[in-house]
Image: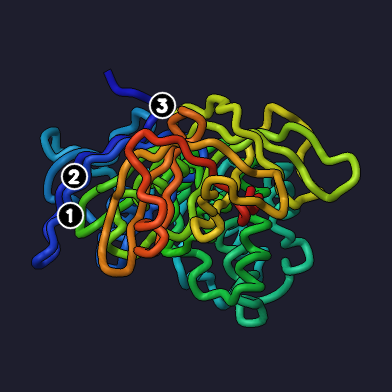
Amino acid sequence: MTDNSVINLTIKKQFNSLLLDYKLTVPNQGVTFIYGPSGAGKTSLINLIAGLLTPDEGSIVVEGNTFFDSKSGVNKKIHHRAVGYVFQDTRLFPHLTVEGNLFYSRSSRSNQQAEKLIALLDLKGLLNRKPNTLSGGEKQRVAIARALLSNPNVLLLDEPFAFLDQEKKQKLLHYFSKLVRYLDIPIIMVSHSKQEIFQLADHLVLLETGKVIGNGFVEQTWNTQIANQQDKGIIKDLIFPVRFLEAHEHYAMIKVELLSPFTFDATDCQLWINQNQISANQQDIHRVKVSTEGIQILLENQSVIEEHNVINCTFIKVLDSNEEGVVIALRVNNSDVMLYKHLTTWLWDKIQLQEQQSVKIQINQLVLIR
């Protein structure tokens, strides 16, 4: 029986010396990011889903709808797949106004739904303008709205923020984060950007040389990837789900509880963040970024300037060791939350932790990102 709640791909495609060999299941809701180095096959993956490329063998099934199956000879045409696609270069029709572009491929969305999309992406003031008068961010907003007005069952985006400067990117990320809460279709996006992943992703797929090397909740998959890639110097930022607990009575600070990145269960680890605006609903799950450089190992009898964000951990093991130092893994409060920290050789020789030894740490660089 086909599972209508997921998108299933088991496909192979030979590109010169690179064999794309994907075995992948992603949820049919939320935002899934495809991440990996250049040449890993990220854009090829969504092109295969869209029908812009044809697999050599395998199958693609989206919510129970078979797009491709080499065994049964099914290969649906692009226009029969009900896929919205946003390209890097937008591909707007230059001779049409924004309004003309938006409604060129409009399908069965009602006027009310169209007005909602226009409002969410702040396009009302642009409707009478031509594409050559728009900024890069404005063009991408139009391209996203046009793709959605075709009433797709899945939205694919190929690095839609890649050519924008930081200011325009942040503005478009703001619009897009509002938009995804309104949509009830799966969104699959190719990206090279940690910032985009941290702010938008619910699910993360990691590719390397045409193969899937990681797939799961974004917090779980990202942090596990860091643990497995120490030799590539990736240890910088960790991300975790948190739940809001309370606002500080006197200061612009909030208290959150760290959650398991695997199950989203509570960990009894409470942290303070410099932040004064957040949803007060304790059922909402937010996301924090922890800089590994801001994790401080507290030596015995060492005093700290501020007492908050000092937590108990267990030293698990050394992940990597070289002439520059070591990378260690720490488990928080006997939970399944793992932290990773680079220590200089001098500091490691000084503390010489033993496996399963208890140690206190302080987290000094903690940012609410979602």
Closer to the camera, 172 or 124? 172
Q: Which of 213/344 is in front?
A: 344
Whether residue 112 can be seen here: yes
Outermost residue on the top side: it is: 1
Q: Quadrant of the N terminus?
A: top left
Tell me how far mark 3 sits from mark 2, CA to CA. Answer: 19 Å
Residue under the image location 38 percent in, 38 percent down: 216
Residue, disc 3: 5
Q: Residues within 10 Å of mark 3 (few under 14, many from 20)?
A: few
Q: Residue furthest front?
A: 301
User: Which color mode does the image show?
Assistant: rainbow
Tell me if 150 is positioned left or right of 24 in this view: right
Residue at which label 1 appears: 20
Which type of secondary structure does the marked residue at label 3 adopt?
loop
Sequence-first tag of 1 and 2 = 2
Q: Are marks 1 and 2 in contact (CB under 8 Å)?
A: yes
Q: Nearer the viewer, residue 287 or 235?
A: 235
